[in-house]
Amino acid sequence: MRYIKGNIEREAVTQSQCEHLEAQGFRPLEAAGILQSSQEAGLQETQGRQLGQLNTAQLRAIAKERGIEGAGSFTKAELLTVLKDVC
């Protein structure tokens, strides 16, 4: 199940993970009334190909789509860290 808090998304597999995220203020995407956008679907496809294989410009574009502020000045390593945390 996918959870969201602000612009941060997390995925939980077990019931205890779900409870932990809910205790931290995350809400299930379904309960938040949020449908998966084509951008989110594209990011999931990108994750399947490994973010590390993308160049910095591609990573910045993904970060911009995800609403990450200041992504234009991030290095590739910083972008990878932020995108992995967001997803």
Image: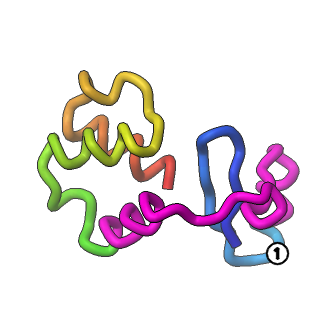
What percent of the width, then of the height, locates residue 40? 47, 61
Residue at numbered disc 1: 15
Q: Is residue 78 left or right of residue 10?
A: left
- Please report the bounds of the magenta region as a residue range: 18-47
Which residue lies at the image location 43% right of the left edge and 26% below the top edge? 69
Which residue lies at the image location 48% right of the left edge and 48% below the top edge? 85
Q: Is residue 20 left or right of residue 81?
A: right
Which residue lies at the image location 42% right of the left edge and 52% below the top edge? 84
What percent of the width, then of the height, locates residue 45? 35, 72
The image quarter in which residue 65 lies: top left
For residue 75, above or below residue 39:
above
Q: Is residue 33 magenta?
A: yes
Which residue lies at the image location 42% right of the left edge and 58% below the top edge? 39
Does dot 1 land on a helix, a strand or a loop? helix
| Quarter of the picture holding the N terminus | bottom right
Q: Is residue 42 magenta?
A: yes
Residue 16 vs residue 48, the one in the foreground: 48
For residue 44, above or below residue 32:
below
Q: Amino acid at mark 1?
A: Gln
What percent of the width, then of the height, locates residue 66? 45, 44
Q: Is residue 87 left or right of residue 23?
A: left
